Image (tube, helix red, strand yellow):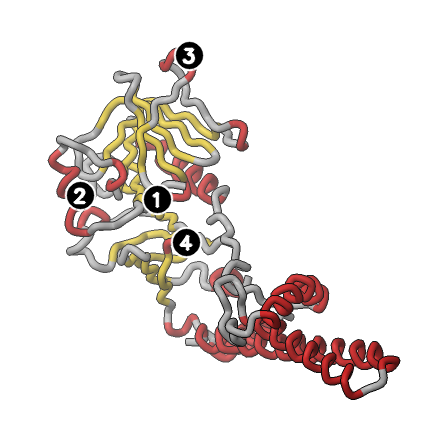
Amino acid sequence: MVLGLRQFSQRTGDGAGQPILDTDNGEELMHVQPSVSIVLGNRPPDSPGTLYITSKQVIWLSDVDKTKGYAVDFLSLSLHAVSRDPEAYTSPCIYTQIETEAVDEDEDEEDSESGEVLDLSKVTEMRLVPSDASLLDTLFEIFCECAELNPEPIEDESEGHNWIFSADQLENEASVGEDAGWHFFQDPTNSIGHSNGDHDLANTVLQTLIWFSAQLKFVLASFTPRTTFPFGFHFHIPCSFKSMINALRMQRRWNMKVTAAISEP
Amino acid sequence: MLFFSYFKDLVGREVTVELKNDLAIRGTLHSVDQYLNIKLENTRVVDQDKYPHMLSVRNCFIRGSVVRYVQLPPDGVDVELLHDATRREARGG
């Protein structure tokens, strides 16, 4: 997803009607507000136009120039507010701040002020001025509702630190780790503790364990009669898993304690 | 959910919300939701010289993801209670 304001010109009915929404992905039109002018940064207002509030974005389309329109995702709207103070802006309006990709403080609004070339991706403020100021509170509430429909996308937290929290998971990992373990066993240049990219701590521990159990098997095979070997093998593996799960549990608790300690004032 | 319920207890109190873009807004906490989106009333910008145009907005919705800090009223924090709650949360129970 791209942050910030962008041009919008996809309209229905030969480019003269309503904005074309991404209905396939569940985008719905929530509110239409005619005769709203838009103010980007410190530029003079563009007017008049129609405001379309959808479940995903805010779209403003010019009534005069049918090719002119702007859109911003709710995910990019850092805040919105009702501004009625004439000192803040001459007309009562909905004031919004837009999160942009890269904030360059030296040149955000000074440039757009000149009005010659407007770089939409740098616009950090947008005002929506309805001709009827009594609508502001309603519009504000609609903005709030739609913002709540758009929480931050959940990041894949398992990436980078694959903590193992259950024995089931561990066994699944084990089948993957075994290959790595055998591979390692054959290739002594790949030393223990040097995880190569996607191997995290747990995998390294597992590799080590498998390495040890492989050694053990070797030792057992050479010092015990062949018949008792399977017993020894099975006896030792569950032991290693159990202690490893405990170690991981303790680590997890410790991490959480540290986090809790940090959040304490 | 801990901080969601914690902030719900602060509704009606004066807080200062500092955003990741350095803007700090002071106002009465009107409501908070599960995403820690924050609604303030009777807001004013703390650093008025830097953000003169935001002198006063009456009510303001702040997206939870852009909040850096929330400054609390000193008596709005029951430290002991918060300690216990964070520990309970850490144990997952």
Position in image of residue A115 (x %, y %): 14, 32
Q: How far apart are marks 4 and 3 (CA)?
A: 37 Å
Q: Quick check: do tags 4 and 3 share a chain?
A: no
**Label 4 is placed on what type of residue?**
Ser
Tag 4 residue: B65
Q: Can residue B81 be seen in this view?
A: no
Nearer the observer: mark 4 or 1; the answer is 4
Position in image of residue A119 (x %, y %): 22, 36
Q: Quick check: do tags 1 and 2 share a chain?
A: yes
**Label 1 is placed on what type of residue?**
His
Q: Quadrant of the image for the N terminus of chain A?
A: top left
Kindly identify which numbered label has been placed on residue A109.
2
Q: How far apart are marks 4 and 1 (CA)?
A: 14 Å
Q: Which residue is at the far top?
A: A14
Question: What's the chain of the residue with tag 4?
Answer: B
Tag 1 residue: A80
Q: Is mark 2 on a helix, strand or loop?
A: helix
Question: What's the chain of the residue with tag 2?
Answer: A
Q: Do the residues labelled 3 and 1 touch (CB within 8 Å)?
A: no
Q: Nearer the viewer, residue A162 or B9?
A: A162
| For residue A166, side relative to residue B9 (left or right) | right
Q: Is residue A8 above or below residue B66?
A: above
Tag 3 residue: A13
Q: Is mark 3 on a helix, strand or loop?
A: helix
Q: Is residue A161 above or below residue A227?
A: above
Position in image of residue A263 (x %, y %): 45, 73
Q: Earlier in the sequence, mark 2 or mark 3?
A: 3
